């Protein structure tokens, strides 16, 4: 007999308690689940002997994680999407149609459709546990809430708060949710069901557990009355909100505009009409390219959370987690890595012979945590706890207690080999050694290693605290249990982790190098620096390729181009060697393709044209579309070559790496999803056109040609 998703019990005080414990792995509001819930609520209504109803999760790690993304993805027409929204909202509305008080007792994440469900209840009680959070993440899928979220939420918490929840998708912890009026009480986990039942019986909750929303002063209420409570004020809010959306999204994400329309226009309508408007706007988004791309990224990142080497790791280490990591090098990357690890409650040992560098690392970490205290994301005592997790030193003494050692020194193979040798001589054989490198060969690094099976690469992206990708580089000798350890650590830091094979440039560096090299060739043809960057940012990249070279460092960029040239993967433009010799190293030197003052980027540096001997300067005849095609298609083509060469295991890995590591526009879904959107035949044809005009570097990858011939997609 199939397991039911809901259990119905009744307390001695005649409160019906509905416990949601899905038959599947997650509490998801799929169609069959909702139908079962609807039948159960109908049965409660028909019985007529209950004084109240409490809805609670039977799981310790979640309340409801949302609606079924698979079912949303399966929608094929706007009409179907609209009908699904109406049906979904109609089922949730059964809570508000009951003639008795209904209470949502929330412990764990309450997301998307789960949030819309509790909005239909009379009261909402939340546990004070850290995992209890509320969010409407639909915007991250290119959607808006479709079952009442844009209508009931602003009516409950106000327009301003609703805009923040819907437009950002960010999570509200339980106490913050109570402050804005989303939650009526925050209570200890152990008393959650008890107090929820009290609410169902209309009993007064403890004074220290009620929301502060209802106790606002007149001074606090004045802005709300002046803006949200009158039509002219709402029009002003709508205009300002639209300006903010244009500024933040650059008009690439239609869902943000639909959210504004749903909230502001819906507030001028009766609730039923507002719900119809919401369903109509949702239906206009679900089949768009942006939505399909973002759902693809959701599935890809979810799949990559699975550690395919976990079995090897468990066989070697059991259930032991990485509690301590050693970091060699207190430079920019080592500093960011140490700070993030401490922030994620991993003990950090630091080694750098330069005591001043270690001091700067500690100063950076202190400032990082102090900023969190100012923003009330940490308490003062927690700042001290985080700092205590960093143990500084000038040698690797004590590193035997670290389960993982990461070197983050200058990109020089001989130096990294020397550090590896020292670690193998002085530390236990259980040490896993990782090199933070963007291009150096891990195979060459481990060539003389005593235990090459313990050596791998961990390519973090700068700044480490913000950039979400980690590229783990493995050789033919790297052991599965070592890879598992690296994955665990990366995921503990909150990173999206992809595994790549040790080939020149790995994945991200290789594909990015081709785009940057082409941008430099266009510059050498006399195209203004600003035109090149604008063409790519107008396409959707967060920064242009020339700006990115400055950010990476011109010297490092040239080192990467030279490495790929040496391995005959590309031919770097030779004129660029003149720049580092004249001190042009990029932002870090305050002098690069752009000028800098006090760390702020200014206009392009006119001296660049002279140093590169560009005689036809300010050539504005190169169309933006051609700039995009030349840079973008080389990027995409090289990504496919990496798949052909087995550098990456699957197209999804390439998309996640490009989006989260290199800023490939998420609304395109990554280079492989981009090919699927545009069509492999069209991409191949465009590459052939560019090849005929500019040379062999535009020759289509074998994988592209094969898919074009078979009219197949990557995903």
Image (cartoon, helix red, strand yellow):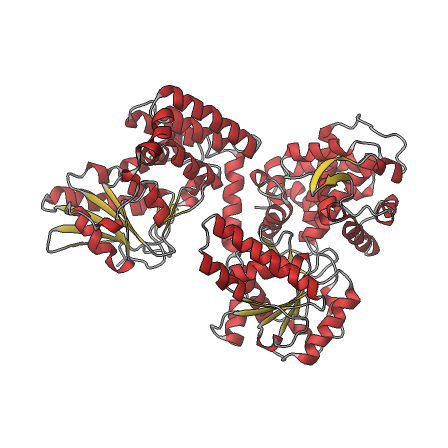
Q: 646 or 396, which is in the foreground?
A: 396
The count of marks equals 0
Q: Is residue 291 left or right of residue 689?
A: left
Q: 587 or 428, which is in the foreground?
A: 587
Identified at 35% across, 57% down, the residue is 129
Q: Is residue 436 left or right of residue 194?
A: right
Q: Is residue 202 left or right of residue 260?
A: left
Image spot of residue 230 (x, y percent): 34, 22
Image spot of residue 306 (x, y percent): 50, 59
Q: Is residue 331 left or right of residue 72?
A: right
Give residue 332's quadrant in the image.
Answer: bottom right
Q: 602 or 261, which is in the foreground?
A: 602
Looking at the image, can residue 499 be seen?
no
Identified at 60% across, 77% down, the residue is 400
Looking at the image, can residue 714 be seen?
yes
Image quarter in which the N terminus is found: bottom left
Q: Is residue 124 above or below residue 157?
A: below
Identified at 38% across, 29% down, the residue is 223
Image spot of residue 74 (x, y percent): 44, 40
Image spot of residue 340 (x, y percent): 56, 58
Give residue 137's quadrant in the image.
Answer: top left
Q: 385 or 499, which is in the foreground?
A: 385
Residue lying at the far top in this picture: please name it.
232
Give residue 687's quadrant in the image.
Answer: top right
């Amino acid at each position: 007999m199939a397991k039911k998703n809901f259990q119905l019990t009744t307390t001695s005080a005649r409160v019906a308690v509905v416990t949601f414990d899905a038959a599947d792995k997650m509490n998801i509001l799929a169609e069959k689940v909702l139908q079962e819930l609807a039948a159960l609520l109908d049965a409660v209504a028909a019985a007529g002997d209950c004084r109240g109803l409490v809805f609670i999760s039977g799981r310790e790690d979640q309340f409801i994680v949302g609606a079924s993304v698979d079912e949303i993805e399966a929608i094929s027409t706007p009409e179907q999407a609209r009908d699904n929204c109406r049906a979904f909202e109609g089922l949730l509305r059964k809570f508000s149609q009951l003639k008795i008080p209904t209470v949502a007792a929330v412990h764990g994440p309450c997301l998307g459709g789960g949030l819309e469900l509790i909005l239909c209840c009379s009261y909402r009680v939340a546990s004070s546990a850290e995992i209890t959070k509320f969010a409407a993440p639909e915007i991250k899928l290119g959607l808006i809430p479709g079952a009442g979220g844009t209508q009931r939420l602003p009516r409950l918490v106000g327009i301003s708060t609703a805009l923040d929840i819907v437009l950002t998708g960010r999570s509200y912890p339980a106490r913050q949710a109570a402050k804005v009026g989303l939650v009526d009480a925050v209570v200890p986990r152990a008393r959650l069901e008890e107090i929820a039942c009290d609410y169902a019986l209309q009993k007064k909750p403890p004074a220290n557990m009620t929301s502060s929303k209802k106790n606002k002063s007149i001074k606090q209420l004045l802005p709300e009355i002046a803006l949200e409570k009158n039509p002219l004020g709402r029009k002003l809010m709508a205009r300002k909100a639209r300006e903010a959306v244009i500024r933040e999204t650059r008009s690439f994400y239609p869902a943000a505009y639909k959210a504004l329309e749903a909230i502001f226009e819906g507030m001028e309508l009766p609730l039923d009409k507002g719900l119809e408007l919401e369903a109509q706007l949702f239906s206009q988004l679900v089949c768009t390219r942006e939505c399909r791309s973002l759902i693809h990224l959701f599935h890809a990142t979810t799949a990559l959370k699975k550690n395919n080497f976990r079995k090897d790791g468990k066989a070697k280490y059991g259930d032991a987690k990485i509690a301590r990591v050693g970091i060699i090098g207190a430079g920019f990357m080592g500093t960011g890595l140490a700070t993030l690890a401490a922030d994620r409650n991993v003990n950090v040992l630091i080694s750098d012979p330069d005591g001043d560098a270690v001091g700067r690392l500690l100063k950076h970490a202190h400032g990082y945590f102090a900023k969190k205290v100012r923003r009330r994301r940490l308490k003062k005592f927690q700042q001290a706890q985080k700092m205590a997790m960093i143990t500084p030193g000038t040698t690797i003494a004590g590193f035997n207690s670290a389960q993982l050692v990461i070197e983050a020194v200058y990109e020089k193979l001989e130096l990294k080999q020397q550090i590896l040798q020292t670690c193998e001589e002085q530390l236990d054989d259980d040490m896993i050694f990782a090199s933070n490198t963007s291009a150096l060969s891990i195979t060459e690094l481990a060539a003389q290693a005593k235990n090459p099976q313990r050596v791998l690469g961990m390519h973090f992206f700068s700044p480490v605290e913000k950039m979400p990708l980690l590229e783990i580089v493995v050789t033919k000798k790297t052991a599965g249990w070592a890879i598992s350890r690296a994955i665990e650590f990366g995921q503990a830091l909150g990173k999206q982790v992809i595994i790549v094979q040790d080939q020149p440039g790995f994945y991200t560096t290789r594909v990015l190098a081709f785009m940057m090299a082409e941008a430099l060739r266009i510059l050498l043809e006399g195209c203004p620096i600003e035109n090149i960057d604008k063409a790519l940012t107008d396409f959707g990249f967060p920064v242009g390729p020339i700006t990115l070279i400055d950010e990476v460092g011109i010297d490092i960029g040239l080192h990467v181009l030279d490495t790929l040239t040496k391995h005959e993967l590309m031919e770097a433009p030779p004129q660029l060697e003149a720049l580092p010799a004249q001190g042009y190293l990029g932002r870090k030197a305050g002098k690069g393709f752009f000028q800098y003052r006090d760390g702020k980027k200014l206009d392009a540096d006119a001296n660049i044209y002279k140093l590169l001997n560009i005689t036809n300067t300010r050539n504005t005849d190169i169309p933006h579309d051609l700039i995009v095609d030349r840079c973008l298609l080389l990027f995409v083509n090289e990504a496919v070559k990496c798949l052909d060469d087995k550098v990456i295991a699957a197209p999804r890995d390439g998309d996640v790496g490009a989006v989260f590591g290199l800023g490939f526009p998420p609304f395109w879904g990554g280079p492989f999803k981009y090919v699927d959107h545009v069509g492999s035949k069209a991409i191949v044809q465009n590459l052939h056109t560019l090849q005929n005009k500019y040379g062999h570097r535009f020759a289509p990858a074998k994988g592209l040609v094969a898919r074009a011939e078979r009219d197949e997609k990557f995903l």
